[in-house]
């Protein structure tokens, strides 16, 4: 299945790939974070779209990511 990673805030596509293990991929991205060579993100939500290409029905999983919030340490006296 075609899988596309998109930034929720901008709609920019960051990666397109094909995966035969969609359930495993979704389980993995719902973990702590998703890391690419250009940044770290967190899972936001996903959509599954069906479309007709020629005479064949296809599916595409779109995984939306939000930017990882930096850990802020606050000291209280």
Image: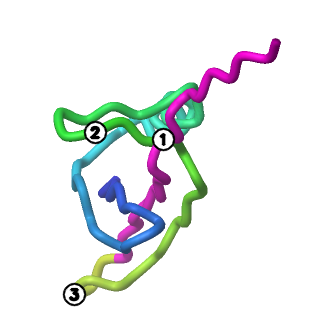
Helix, strand, or loop for circle 2?
A: strand
Spatial CA distance of label 2 from label 1 is 9 Å
Q: How is the image coloured?
A: rainbow
Is 11 located above or below residue 31 in the figure?
below
Q: Position of residue 76 (x, y in %)?
A: 79, 17
Q: Residue at x 50, y 34 (%)?
A: 70
Q: Which residues are magenta?
A: 57-77
* Residue 61 falls inside the magenta stretch: yes
What residue is shown with label 1? 68
Q: Return the residue found at the far top.
A: 77
Spatial CA distance of label 2 from label 3 is 36 Å
Badge 1: few (under 14), some or many (20 or more) residues near its Cα, within 10 Å?
A: some
Badge 2: few (under 14), some or many (20 or more) residues near its Cα, within 10 Å?
A: few
Q: In front here: 32 or 56?
A: 32
The reply to whether callout 3 and callout 1 are in contact (CB within 8 Å) is no
The reply to whether callout 2 and callout 3 are in contact (CB within 8 Å) is no
What residue is shown with label 3? 54
What residue is shown with label 2? 39
Q: Residue at x 68, y 23 (%)?
A: 74
């Amino acid at each position: 299945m075609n899988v596309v990673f998109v930034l929720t805030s901008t709609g920019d596509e960051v990666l397109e790939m094909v995966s035969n293990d969609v359930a495993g991929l979704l389980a993995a991205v719902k973990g702590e974070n998703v890391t690419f060579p250009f940044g770290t993100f967190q899972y936001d939500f996903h959509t599954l779209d069906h479309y007709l290409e020629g005479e064949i029905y296809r599916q595409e999983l779109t995984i939306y990511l939000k930017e990882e919030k930096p850990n802020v340490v606050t000291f209280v006296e």
